[in-house]
Image: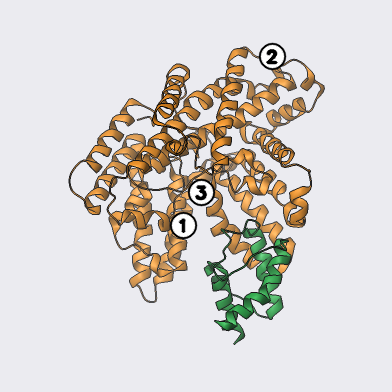
Chain colours: A orange, B green
Amino acid sequence: MDFLSLDFFLFYSILLLFHWLPKISNALYQNIIILIGNYIFYYLIDKKSVPILLFISLISFLSGIFFLYGKKMKNLYLKLSFVCILFLFLFFKLSNNIYNFLLDFNFYPTTKGAFNILLPVGISYYIFKSLSYLFEIKKDVKNVEKNILNYFCFVSFFPCILAGPIDRTTNFLPQIKLVRFFNYTLAVNGFRQILWGLFKKLVIADNCTMITAEIFHNPDSYPGSTLLIVLFLYTIEVYADFSGYSDIAIGVSKTFGINIKPNFNYPFFAKNIRDFWRRWHISLTSWLTDYVYSPLSIYLRYFNKGGQFFAIILNFLVVGLWHGAKTNYLLYGLLHGFYFAPSIFTPLKKQKTWLFSRSIQTLVTLMLVTLTFVVFKTNNINECIEYYSRIFSKSIFSEPKFENSILVLFLIIMSIIMFCIEWISYGNNEEFGIANLHKYYNIYIRWFIYIIIIITIGVYMNTTNSSFLYFKF
Amino acid sequence: MQKKIILLEEIKPIFIKVLENEELILTLESSSKEIEEWDSLNHIQIVVAIEKHFKIRFTSREIQGWQTVGDLIDTILEKTS
């Protein structure tokens, strides 16, 4: 089942009806419906990985129980569980690399790529969710969840299982323990968020792919000017795709009465790299800050700035590794680490004023981030070098050439519209582009806006690529 | 309570110096959520500066357990009494 399909729409509608319609105001009933829905969904997406999801949920749940009731062995169970889950994560991320590496040294008499373990869908996300639970119970035993149904709902929560956000038990469990009463405002905002996510994904991201997919991997056929525009389009594509997915996930959760924390907070309005990483893929970066960077920087604090520098670089290497054990992802992480690190050595006041105006700072930040996507996207080092050398060559002044210039123009206009709408909602401190429209416009204008968006999606959506970019991580 | 207020006034200059904000308002309820410049990077510098000032040493568990300035002050009180 594709996430953006009629099947999903049917599944979602039926689950929503079962969840809200019966006059049973009971958290147990609602959670059973959600849990059944979670596993049906995951079974239909990736049936062979259901045992893995069950296994990870079970051992992390049990380590909580052992931690609570075990006496001498409680820390041991926790550590074993942690090692086991981490091992699974590294196994899936690294196994193909290790196999190919061994092949290079002739350990196996077969060809490269013959061994190909497929990553279970969503594993990077639900593994990180269950690891965060282990950290939280170690911090405070009060965080142990004794109800297996509630905990399993958390790990397998279907809106977030494919590509996050990586939620925490401290956010989710207090909500799931209580019966949810239908909240009209929350549900409507949920639908708005789903609509906004669909717009970004179907109109912008999917159409950008039509341009970027081919050109990115053939940089030698295009002038620097074309490649620069394509790079910007790819940056917009990643944002629209991933934040669009997150909006759909969070919006769907809201329609079930569950609030999931935002995953993006207008990252392209960031004033510097440090600010950017507070706004981009927030659930991952806050996970890493809480469980990797903070403990490490506390441990290394007597090494002053050197210790902090090391902690930052390591943190960003993990960002890279999380995406995959490929050189380009590690380089991507490292590049961001080196972008980030100077802020340790620069006084805060200088960071605020060094480029005079806020707009210039924002544009420079955007440019720096955009440039890292060459490393992120290209398949190998040659492609990467070719791409950069063309952008930084005289051909950047030549006329850009596209097979489909109209589509490029359309995408530039749509992106400007998207950013304008987000600029307004950013100024209003709203969570996403069309959040809480009832506060600003009357019912006729609101419905006019919804209908325009729906028509735009209907006319311009591109269904040749129905998967989301971040599903592969 | 009196001791906490005294300590709050004592650590305020450390916060002002690290966060480079002369107009900083610090209360027992303050946390990194309200103070823009106070992120995970500056947090470590504040911790080290406080350890040096009071000649104490915090454990990782204590540092990671603080939610507010009040929690930090409670730990300082425990270690200095």
Looking at the rendered image, the quarter that the N terminus of chain A falls into is top left
Q: Tell me, for residue A401, which label it has, or none.
A: 2
Within the image, what quadrant is residue A311 found in? bottom right
- Seen from the viewer's position, the closer of residues A182 and A172 is A182
Could you tell me the amino acid type at mark 3? Ser
Q: Secondary structure at mark 3?
A: helix
Q: CA distance from mark 2 to mark 3?
A: 38 Å
Q: Chain of mark 2?
A: A
Local crowd size for mark 3, using a 10 Å CA cut-off: few (<14), some (14–19), many (≥20):
many
Relative to A175, does residue A104 appear above or below in the rendering?
A: above
Q: Which residue is mark 1?
A: A132
The image position of residue A283, as x and y in percent, is: 51, 49
Relative to A359, does residue B46 appear above or below in the rendering?
A: below
Q: Residue at x 47, y 27 (%)?
A: A199
The image position of residue A341, as x and y in percent, is: 72, 52
Sequence-wise first label, 3 or 1: 1
Q: Tell me, for residue A22, which label it has, or none.
A: none
From this viewpoint, is residue A217 visible?
no
In this view, the residue farthest toward the left is A23
Please identify, in this view, whether the residue under mark 3 or under mark 1 is nearer the observer: 3
In this view, the residue farthest toward the right is A394
The image position of residue A253, as x and y in percent, is: 37, 43
Q: CA distance from mark 3 to mark 1?
A: 11 Å
Local crowd size for mark 2, using a 10 Å CA cut-off: few (<14), some (14–19), many (≥20):
few
Could you tell me the amino acid type at mark 1? Ser
